[in-house]
Amino acid sequence: MQKTFPIIDLIATGQNIMRLRKERGLSVRDLQAYFGFEQPQAIYKWQQGQSLPTVDNLYALSILLEVTVDEILVGSIPRQQKNKYEQQAKACCSSHIQKNILYFGAVQGAAA
């Protein structure tokens, strides 16, 4: 059995961090204070998909946001699997459902 190497989607993970932060009513300044950063640039870089938090900061972020680390990170699908999911989605579904299939396919592909 050959497993595909999991890849983290930086952009989607950054968008996820921003979504989770906003859902909890937290500002970037709130996160800056929580982490003890002098400047908020690191948080903006996370949200823009330019970088990821360190393992320690990722763990602390999961505690603050009350989610698991896995709920913060978004995996990316290797190209051949993505093509398969795209073909399946186009064959059966509306554009809204197609996006869900591609998203959940990415999560499943990252977990494989």
Image (cartoon, rainbow, N blue to C red):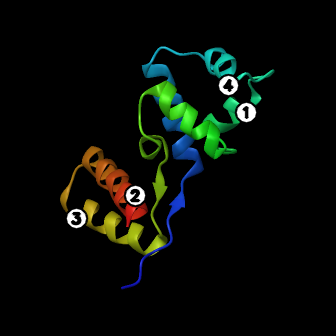
Query: Separation of disc 4 and disc 3 at Cα?
Result: 46 Å
Query: Does the residue at mark 1 contact the one at mark 4 (Cβ under 8 Å)?
Result: yes
Which-is-in-front pick, marks 4 and 2? 4
- The residue identified by callout 4 is 35
Mark 2 secondary-structure assignment: helix
Q: Is residue 9 left or right of residue 2?
A: right
Query: Separation of disc 1 and disc 2 at Cα?
Result: 26 Å
Query: Does the residue at mark 3 contact the one at mark 2 (Cβ under 8 Å)?
Result: no
Q: Which callout, 1 or 3, points at the residue further toward the start of the chain?
A: 1
Query: Does the residue at mark 1 contact the one at mark 2 (Cβ under 8 Å)?
Result: no
- The residue identified by callout 2 is 106
Query: Separation of disc 4 and disc 2 at Cα?
Result: 30 Å
- Picture quarter containing residue 33? top right
* Up/down of 9 relative to 78, above or below: above
Q: Amino acid at mark 3?
A: Ala
Q: Which callout, 3 or 2, points at the residue further toward the start of the chain?
A: 3
Q: Which callout, 1 or 4, points at the residue further toward the start of the chain?
A: 4
Which-is-in-front pick, marks 1 and 4? 4
Q: Which callout, 4 or 2, points at the residue further toward the start of the chain?
A: 4
Which-is-in-front pick, marks 1 and 2? 1
- The residue identified by callout 3 is 91
Q: Is residue 48 visible?
A: no
Rendering coords of residue 60 (x, y %) = 57, 32
